[in-house]
Amino acid sequence: MGKAERGTKVRQVLEKVGILPNLINRYPHEFSGGQCQRIGIARALIINPKLIICDEPVSALDVSIQAQMINLLMELQSELGLSLVFIAHDLSVVKHISDRVMVLYLGNMVEFAGSDDFYGRPLHPYAQALIASVPVPDPTVPKRPQDALIAGELPSPINPPSGCVFRTRCRHATDICAEQKPIPDTANEDHLVACHYWRQINAG
Ligand code: SF4
């Protein structure tokens, strides 16, 4: 592209992410955290991608700015036909933006399902604990049982536990969990779970 064409394209993509084109000559330190995040999205969009991998895109932002960013990503998703791989540890944010959810523990897939199915009926003990730990901003909602939460520390990814990698923190762990790595099972056509306990209670 020539210089003029480049300038036009940059202004267009900045406008798309909600940055006024007259701010184009600002220095990086003159932008807020939310604006920097929008500029990051603009940098990804300018090459007309079909897929964007968003690795913890909102974890460093205030809650109000997080909502703006998520809404912006969802608008761009439907306007441009983008696919987003959204990596996050906040399951309430994931619920808002995702069609399908995969839960990983120490790099292993433990559950994979459509969003409605997953949030309506999480099957893996780790996924259940993650969902149980999401704060509910309503004092009238009863506290979740403590036994649904996870105890202990994350093991070293360099030296993961044998068998099921979640077994050192799982309240349902038995001998087989140390001996055999669970293979993902089909709970229904849109729902996979890798857990010996789940397999046992659903056998026959
Ligand atoms: S396989 Fe065993 S240790 Fe792993 S999540 Fe299931 S019950 Fe827990």
Image: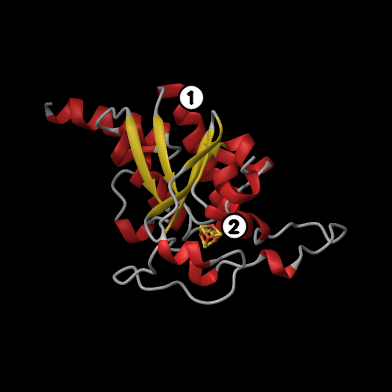
Q: Residues within 10 Å of mark 1 (few under 14, many from 20)?
A: few
Q: Which colour style is shown? A: secondary structure
Residue at x 63%, y 44% (from the top left corner): 202
Q: Is residue 107 left or right of residue 189?
A: left
> Is residue 124 shown to the viewer in this render?
yes
Q: Residue shown at 41%/73% (left/top)? A: 155
Kind of residue sitting beneath label 2: Pro
**Mark 2–mark 1 CB contact (< 8 Å):** no
Hey, which residue is sitting farthest bottom in the picture?
Answer: 152
**Label number found at residue 78:** 1
Quadrant of the frame with the C terminus: top right
- Residue type of the residue flagged with mark 1: Ser
Mark 2 or mark 1, which is nearer to you? 2
Q: Quadrant of the N terminus?
A: top left
Tag shown at residue 31: none
Where is residue 102 shown, x and y percent of the image? Answer: 47, 44
User: What percent of the width, then of the height, locates residue 27?
Assistant: 29, 56
Q: Which mark is residue 125?
A: 2
Residue at the left extreme of this rendering:
2
Residue 185 shown left or right of residue 28 in the figure: right
Q: Judge: label 2 CB < 8 Å from ligand 1.
A: yes
Could you say which is closer to the camera, residue 178 or residue 114? 178
